[in-house]
């Protein structure tokens, strides 16, 4: 049975007019996902690849339990997702570290919610910091760490709660190319050591081929799965320096590129023509999609 | 690899007497020159020594006033007003700010314009109101100090809570934190730097207001002492009061900065 199943998931956001475009309707609905279905197997490294604004991050938020689908259902081990849970660890694109906590304190964060006693917390946190290659950096504050190291801490934090599923939302997008490559390899190693199911969102084709067992290519808005592509490269072969020039790698990359190209073109058209203007955003970019993250303590 | 560029960050500076001496001279040069000019100008007759006595006279006067007990007594009277007024402001404005910024955002949006107007009202113009309502005793002085320093504390607390990075709240939610845990573990520490700016401003305002309140109507305190000394032509005593007030302000500011450093030692120090 599949570890994660999504069936006809639909999500619409209501975008409020910002008042710049007076002719625009007061509010307008923005369809982020329109009937997305997919299955993710246990222990699989599953990458979701898509153009900006295709709703891939929204889907990841749903898996994390931060947002609920309007229609359709997502289940983990056959049980519908009812909210955030410690069976899933999340890594975000922004490092999202707590600046007032040391590396060790950051990794311990989720463990505190799990009500693990202090000593055991520190031991676990140290173990996972060393797993991501940060032994000796326990007492550093985030401002004393480089971008790559910050993201390592975030990965250790997500792993420390010992989740079954690791959710990663473009975790390496903010890093420089060299650091990104190192972290990708390290992530594969960590995955092999921990045997987690990983759901990884990215817009980088190269990254998708390098990391994934299977890649789901998303369409531009509204997002659905366009095609699921198997990556015919064994796990061991990926540690080789030459993996990126093998015929399998190149072939898969070309296939994904062809699939994605159409969607990127489409998403550009959507941006420049109708929807965004209708919504009164008028910026021509979809980066302003407001994700429903209530900051308020009072809501719900 | 990546580690190498940050390994030297926390290395404590080795003890360097000459360097320390240099720093002290560098930092106090302006003050020393100011004191020398102040000392020389009345002595050589550049200004009238009756109206501007040299610092040597002022410091002797401060010493005598300390020995006679008057200066400690007046300082104590002033400080206790500040402690009560400022303490009350913290006691009220901090929880209120956290509530308005975190829990009752819609309510905050509604009352914010009113709060801004109240905060902007010049407190000196409100003296008569406070006196009418609270009399001319201690309560009205503590009341006006409280009134003045609650605003920066309140506004900065609201801003601090509101500007907490949503991604951090997302992380906290994925970890399944309760509302109360979210407040203690994320909102409170994340807003601390902004909140502390408010507290420090409040502390400065409280001294500002204290002296004003004591000059307008009081029978004790440093403000009263300065005004009375001026009225009875005890000019050096007046300066003794002025210097004491300045020193108190510096001491309070240094204490606040030290506390702030402790609470927010995780922040990167930015030097321009």
Image (cartoon, coloured by chain):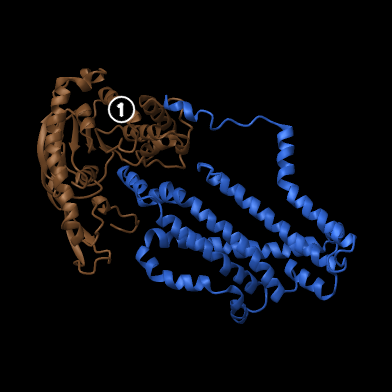
As helix, strand or loop, the secondary structure at mark 1 comes to: helix
Viewer-nearest residue: A175 or B186: A175
Viewer-nearest residue: B223 or B37: B37
- Which quarter shows the C terminus of chain A? bottom left
- With B221 as the anchor, is B174 left or right in this view? left
- Which quarter shows the N terminus of chain A? top left
Q: Quadrant of residue A207?
A: top left
**Chain A pictured colour:** brown
Answer yes or no: is residue A99 visible.
Answer: yes
**Chain B pictured colour:** blue
Viewer-nearest residue: B207 or A24: A24
Q: Quadrant of residue A196?
A: top left
Q: Is the residue A160 above or below the residue A267 in the image?
A: above
Q: How packed is label 1: few (under 14 Cα within 10 Å), some, or many (20 or more)?
A: some
What residue is rendered at 81% in x and 71% in y? B229
Residue A101 in the image: state x and y as whole percent. 45, 39
What residue is rendered at 16% in x and 25% in y? A250
The residue wearing badge 1 is: A181
Q: Is the residue B136 above or below the residue B44 in the image?
A: below
């Amino acid at each position: 049975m599949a570890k994660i199943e999504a069936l006809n998931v639909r999500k619409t956001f209501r975008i409020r007019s910002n008042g710049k475009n007076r002719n625009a309707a007061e509010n307008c609905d923005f369809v982020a996902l329109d009937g997305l279905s997919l299955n993710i197997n246990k222990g699989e490294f599953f990458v979701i690849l898509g153009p900006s604004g295709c709703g891939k991050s929204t889907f990841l938020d749903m898996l994390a339990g931060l947002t609920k689908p309007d229609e359709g259902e997502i289940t983990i081990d056959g049980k519908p997702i009812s909210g955030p849970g410690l069976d899933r660890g999340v890594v975000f694109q922004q490092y999202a570290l707590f600046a007032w906590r040391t590396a060790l304190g950051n990794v311990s964060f989720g463990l505190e919610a799990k009500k693990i006693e202090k000593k055991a917390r520190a031991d676990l946190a140290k173990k996972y910091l060393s797993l991501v290659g940060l032994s000796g950096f326990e007492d550093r504050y985030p401002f004393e760490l480089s971008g790559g190291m910050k993201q390592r801490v975030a990965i250790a934090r997500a792993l420390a709660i010992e989740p079954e599923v690791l959710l990663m939302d473009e975790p390496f997008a903010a890093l420089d190319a060299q650091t990104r490559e190192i972290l990708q390899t390290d992530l594969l190693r960590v995955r092999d050591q921990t045997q987690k199911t990983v759901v990884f969102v990215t817009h980088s084709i190269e990254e998708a081929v390098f990391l994934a067992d299977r890649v789901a290519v998303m369409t531009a808005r509204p997002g659905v799965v366009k095609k699921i592509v198997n990556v015919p490269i064994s796990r061991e072969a990926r540690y080789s320096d030459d993996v990126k020039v093998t015929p399998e790698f190149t072939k898969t990359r070309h296939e994904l590129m062809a699939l994605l190209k159409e969607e990127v073109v489409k998403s550009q058209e959507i941006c420049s023509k109708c929807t965004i203007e209708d919504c009164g955003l008028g910026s021509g970019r979809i980066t302003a999609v407001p994700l429903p993250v209530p900051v308020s303590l009072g809501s719900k | 690899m990546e580690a190498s560029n940050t390994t030297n960050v926390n290395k404590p500076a080795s003890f360097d007497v000459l360097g320390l001496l240099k720093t002290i001279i560098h930092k106090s040069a302006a003050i020393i020159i100011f004191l020398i000019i102040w000392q020389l100008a009345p002595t050589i007759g550049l200004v009238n020594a009756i109206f501007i006595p040299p610092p040597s006279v002022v410091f002797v006067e401060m010493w005598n006033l300390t020995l006679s007990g008057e200066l400690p007594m007046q300082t104590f009277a002033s400080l206790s007003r500040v402690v009560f007024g400022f303490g009350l402001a913290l006691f009220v404005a901090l929880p209120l700010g956290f509530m308005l910024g975190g829990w009752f955002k819609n309510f905050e949006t509604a009352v914010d314009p009113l709060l801004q107007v109240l905060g902007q009202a010049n407190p000196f113009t409100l003296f008569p109101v406070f006196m009418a309502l609270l009399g001319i005793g201690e309560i009205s002085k503590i009341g006006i100090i409280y009134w003045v320093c609650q605003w920066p504390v309140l506004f900065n607390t609201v801003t601090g809570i509101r500007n907490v990075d949503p991604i951090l709240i997302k992380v906290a939610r994925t970890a399944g934190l309760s509302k109360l845990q979210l407040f203690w573990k994320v909102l409170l520490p994340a807003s601390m730097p902004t909140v502390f700016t408010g507290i420090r401003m409040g502390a400065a305002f409280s001294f500002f207001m204290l002296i004003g309140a004591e000059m307008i109507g009081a029978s004790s305190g440093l403000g009263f002492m300065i005004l009375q000394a001026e009225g009875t032509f005890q000019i050096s005593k007046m300066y003794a009061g002025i210097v004491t007030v300045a020193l108190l302000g510096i001491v309070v500011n240094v204490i606040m900065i030290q506390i702030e450093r402790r609470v927010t030692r995780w922040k990167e120090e930015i030097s321009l």
